[in-house]
Image: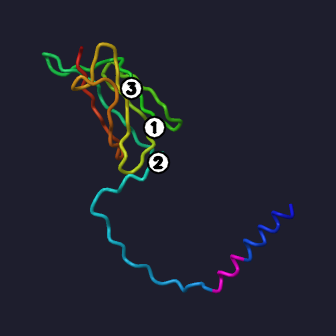
Amino acid sequence: MRLWQGIVLLAFSVGLACCGSATVPTAPTTVAQPTQPPAATGVFAFAKVTLSGVVSEVMATGQAPIEGVSIYCEPCGEATHTFASTDNNGLYSFDGVWVSPGITTQIWVGKKDYLYPAGREGWTNVMVNGDTRFDIQLTRR
């Protein structure tokens, strides 16, 4: 207990010693606005925005929605690690996304017998800036 009292007293003394060199506040200066998008900070905040879209495939008759596609979004939902499944119109939706300026949101898309464009399976990145619609096109294997 005595050691803690000594540490507190020492910290208080050092703080008082610095008080004599206080500076007088000055008027704020003008800060130039950035001309580029903000740099990635790695600091995430929960945004009450929606990430949604339609998953479809190209058929001879045009685009057709795909029902039952699984979509995983780790930073979606207040508790995170959220799954969605497309309805019979191919629609999926996530309410709320943890976002950080300049950092994309990674989602995983998959359904048996389907591939993501260019033969890839799974992961893709989405830039979420407010309510975001991200349509996905899959191809049959």
| Kind of residue sitting beneath label 3 | Ile
Q: Percent from the top left, x then y, of residue 80?
A: 50, 35
Report the disc number at residue 71. 3
| Kind of residue sitting beneath label 2 | Phe
Is residue 27 left or right of 130 when viewed as pictured?
Answer: right
Main secondary structure of the magenta stretch: helix
Determine the image quadrant of residue 99: top left
Residue at position x 69%, y 81% in the image:
17
Q: In the displayed image of the protein, which residue is found farthest to the front?
A: 3
Q: Is residue 27 above or below residue 134?
A: below
> Circle 3 — which element?
strand
Give yes or no for residue 19 being in the magenta stretch. Answer: yes
Residue at position x 77%, y 68% in the image:
8
Report the disc number at residue 64. none
Considering depth in this image, is 88 or 41 the residue closer to the camera?
A: 41
Q: Percent from the top left, x then y, of residue 6?
A: 81, 68
Residue marked by disc 2: 44
Determine the image quadrant of residue 107: top left
Q: What is the distance, in whole Å, between disc 3 and disc 2 at their CAs?
A: 21 Å
Quadrant position of the C terminus in the picture:
top left
Quadrant position of the N terminus in the picture:
bottom right
> Circle 2 — which element?
loop
Q: In this view, does 35 lie above or below 49?
A: below
Report the disc number at residue 75. 1
| Kind of residue sitting beneath label 1 | Pro
Q: How crowded is mark 1: few (under 14 residues within 10 Å), some or many (20 or more)?
A: many
Ranked by sequence position, the earlier of labels 2 and 1 is 2
The segment highlighted magenta reads 14-20
Ranked by sequence position, the earlier of labels 3 and 2 is 2
For the image shown, how many numbered marks are present on the structure?
Answer: 3
Considering depth in this image, is 27 or 23 the residue closer to the camera?
A: 23
